[in-house]
Structures are given as structure tokens and as C-alpha cells.
Image: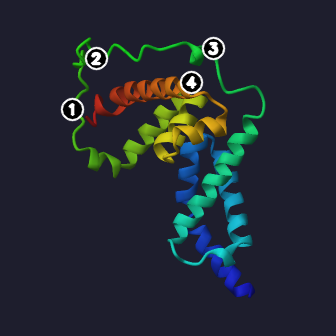
Amino acid sequence: MAGKETDLARELESHRDYLVRFALFMLRDLALAEDAVQETFISALASHEEFQGRSQLRTWLTAILKNKVFDLVRSRSKGPPMVSSDDLQEDDGRDGAFGERGQWIDPPSNWGLPEEAFESSQFWETYLKCCKVMPERQALVFSMREVLGLSAEEICKKLELTTSNLHVILFRARQSLRTCMTKNWFGGEHG
């Protein structure tokens, strides 16, 4: 039995880098990401008999990790609400990028081949740097929505946000990311 657990521990360890990167997207803190992955491994080892092989091991570990990340987010947000007065201000949805008829005022630079960018480690390094520039709440909400694919209802429930507050936060996060990526990736030497 000990040999099987040792083999499983080695197999789990082979997914560490991927899982840490995934957690880092969500948490933006390497120590927290590593803690979440360690908790994931502990849970996986404790419940490995439940894994029936219907999905890939990495998929199962990622599902466990998502729950660990949500637990961390919940425990960190038990203090004052994650809402600032800036987030509560109404937004008319116009950011100055589009004219009254919906045309670009200042079109984005050439984005090249997006499929190739997604395969580039430099692209993801730039993306992570841009996420770090965002306020923590914006980056977290953006990651929950766009990386994990959670519904607006799930995010609002988990973070105790109103729907309109969520939309404002997502709007600002997307604006911040667009500005940073345009400057540091698309408009730079890579674009």
C-alpha cells in the first residue's frame, strides 16, 4: 500500500508547476498559490480512492484546487467587504475607446496571431504582470469570470457583491488589462 501512495505522490508532484501557475492566476501571491497547491495534494492523497479515472488526473487536481482557492478567497474576505466607494459609482459603460456610434476612436494596434501569443511564455509573463498592476479585487473577479468561467451569480454569491457592482469591477478590470497589454505586448516589440 505504501508503494502505491508513493507512486501517487510522485504523480501528483509532476503536476505541481501547472497547478502553481493556475493558482497564481487567481491569487496573485506565490506563497498563497503554493499553499493552495499543497492543500490540494493533501486532499488528493486523502481521497485518492474516489478518483475513478473518468477524467485526467490534472483535471481532477484542478477541480480540487479551484475549491481550495475559493476557500482561501472566502477566508480572506471575511473582514471588511471587498467593495470600495469607487466600485459603487455608477458607470455609463463608455470608456472613451468608442465614439457615440460604436466605432473605435483609437483602434488597438495589430495583434498579430493570437493563437501564437497564447503559446508564448513571454505573453503569459506580460499578462501576469498586467494582472499584478490591477487592484487585487479586480484581478480576482476577472480571473474568476474569465479564467475559471464562473457565472456572475456564482461570483456575486462567493464575494458578496451586487450584480451591478460585479459588472463595474469587470469593466474596470478589462480596461486595465487592455491598456496594459496594448502598451506592453501588442504595442511593444511583440505587436
Q: Is residue 94 above or below residue 135?
A: above
Q: Is residue 161 above or below residue 37?
A: above
Mark closest to the chain's N terminus, 2 or 1:
2
Q: Do labels 2 and 1 touch, CB within 8 Å?
A: no
Q: Nearer the viewer, mark 4 or mark 2?
A: 4
**Residue position marked by numbered label 2 in the rendering:** 98
Mark 1 to mark 4 CA distance (whole Å): 32 Å
Mark 2 to mark 1 CA distance (whole Å): 17 Å
Mark closest to the chain's N terminus, 4 or 3:
3
**Residue position marked by numbered label 4 in the rendering:** 165
Label 2 SS: loop
Q: Residues within 10 Å of mark 2 (few under 14, many from 20)?
A: few
Mark closest to the chain's N terminus, 1 or 4:
1
On the rendered image, what quadrant is the N terminus found in? bottom right
**Residue position marked by numbered label 3 in the rendering:** 85
**Residue position marked by numbered label 1 in the rendering:** 110
Q: Position of residue 84 (x, y in %)?
A: 64, 18
Q: Nearer the viewer, mark 2 or mark 1?
A: 2
